[in-house]
Amino acid sequence: MRQHVNPLSKNFFEINPIPPLNNVFENPNLPLHLDIGCASGDFLFELALKNENWNYIGIEIREKLVFNANLKMKNREYKNLYFSFGNANNIFNHSKNKPLIDSCNSISLYFPDPWFKKKHHKRRIIQPKFINLLSNSMRKRSLIFIKTDVKELFDYMECQISESPKFEKLANADFKLNESFNPNKIQTNREKYVLMNQLTIYERIYMKI
Ligand SMILES: C[S@@+](CC[C@H](N)C(=O)[O-])C[C@H]1O[C@@H](n2cnc3c(N)ncnc32)[C@H](O)[C@@H]1O
């Protein structure tokens, strides 16, 4: 079983801002997707190869995973993929990253750590401050995708996001899969495990209004 990292530890206070997009992508003008808590990055490696008309950034708090993902990047040339190490809350809070959040088309939070104990809820990625930050920095019509197999965590995330007047639930009819960051419905590693074990997936898409 893996050891969870405490995102509130002061080890994560200092972050390296993500470089300007024209330094990391061959074509910085492509639509941009950010995946928060990308773990080993397998999901993003597959997305980046299948959808060369999108740019992808993965954010992960476990340094070793980002180190390994960056090693993998050296084996093959990815023109549309970048990994950033750190606590997503601190990365998003950095003033130099504001333009990045503003330029992204969508963000995914897939199967975030549930931190079951009540005293640990403050370690969950989605917090009122985080949603406030997103609501002030994301551009209109950009999307947030959430998925989890933990109903209590889903209700918690749903409650935090719904409290913001700047996000609304996207109706199924308004979602255009072909125009999304994941038109082939590629699954994350956790999603594959959950589906294999026939557990329920709770998911929702929100749009910035
Ligand atoms: C349960 S795993 C899910 C991984 C992947 N999204 C999936 O669906 O397979 C959650 C991941 O989020 C990372 N994580 C947790 N808190 C984070 C934070 N504050 N910032 C960035 N990554 C975080 C964890 O280290 C872990 O790799």
Image (tube, grey):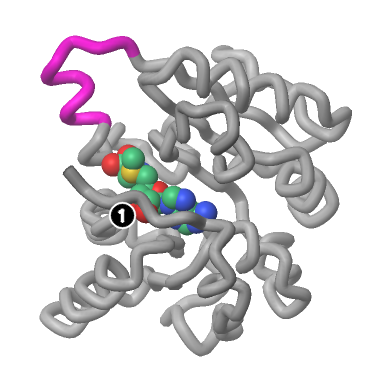
Q: Is residue 188 left or right of residue 93?
A: left
30, 7: nearer the viewer: 7
Give the vertical position of 120 relative to 82 (above or below).
above
Q: Is residue 118 left or right of residue 38?
A: right
Give the vertical position of 163 relative to 172 (above or below).
below
Q: Is residue 163 left or right of residue 75?
A: right
Kindly give the residue lying farthest to the right in the view shown.
165
Amino acid, disc 1: Ala
Name the element at disc 1: loop
Q: Is residue 192 left or right of residue 4?
A: left
Residue 61 drawn in magenta: no
How many C-alpha atoms fall within 10 Å of the one at disc 1: few (<14), some, or many (≥20)? many
From the image, which quarter does the N terminus lie in?
A: top left
Q: Splitting the image into 4 quarters, where does residue 59 fall?
A: bottom left
* Residue at 31% from the left image edge and 54% from the top image edge: 39
* Residue at 51% from the left image edge and 15% from the top image edge: 152
Label 1 beta carbon within 8 A of ligand 1? yes
Q: Which residue is mark 1?
A: 39
From the image, which quarter does the C terminus lie in?
A: top right
Q: Is residue 35 visible?
A: no
* Residue at 24% from the left image edge and 58% from the top image edge: 40
Q: Which residues are magenta?
A: 191-200
Q: Position of residue 182 (x, y in %)?
A: 38, 41
Q: Is residue 200 visible?
A: yes
Q: Splitting the image into 4 quarters, where does residue 96 fall?
A: bottom right
